[in-house]
Image (tube, grey):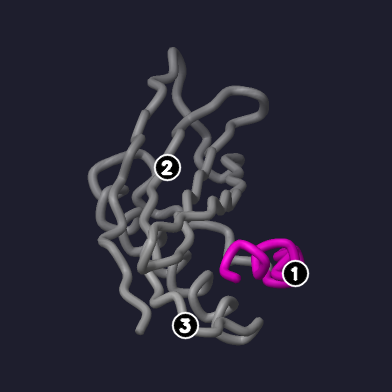
Amino acid sequence: MIEQTEMVVTKWQMNPSEKAVDIKNVTNHTTLEVMRKRNAIKKGIACRLTCRFMLADVPVLDYSAEHSYVIDLDEVIDRTELANMIRNSFAQFNEKFEFRKLGTLLHDEGLVPLDENNLDLDSILPLLV
């Protein structure tokens, strides 16, 4: 059985600008960090997603959130299941962003979609053995 903890926002830091921000020139980049978790009866991974919105070389927003997957020791996770877990993590990360961005200068902005071609699933799978 795979259980998932709630996605918790750990950082939401808007950096006010001295001048008006031309929002159409704001870019963002999201990173994923994965850490192994294990005890005597369960295994799992902790996922932290971090996104930084930039205007040229000035940060506009730093946003991070994390959660975990807790898995029975005898459960075998394959590449497909792992990819689904990461997609789900990004979807929850995006959902939190969509709610929190309301009332900010980023209210019309969205996260760059997850590029699954850049995911190195083969380096994450050993964490779940």
Q: How many numbered markers are drawn?
A: 3
Q: Give the labeled residue for mark 2.
A: 64
Mark 1 is surrounded, within 10 Å at the Cα level, by few (under 14), some (14 to 19) or many (20 or more) other residues, namely few
Q: Residue at x 70, y 69 (%)?
A: 121
Location of residue 122 by image quarter: bottom right
Relative to 125, residue 101 above or below = above
3 vs 1, front mark: 3
**On the image, numbered disc 1 is attached to which residue?**
122
Tag 3 and tag 1, C-beta contact below 8 Å: no
What is the magenta range? Answer: 116-129
Badge 3 element: loop
Three-letter amino acid code at the position of disc 3: Asp
Residue type at mark 2? Ser
In percent of width and height, residue 68 lies at 38, 60
* Residue 94 falls left or right of residue 76: left
Q: Does 124 appear in magenta?
A: yes
Front-most of residues 21 and 66? 66
Mark 2: few, some, or many residues within 10 Å (few <14, many ≥20)? Answer: many
Residue 121: in magenta span:
yes
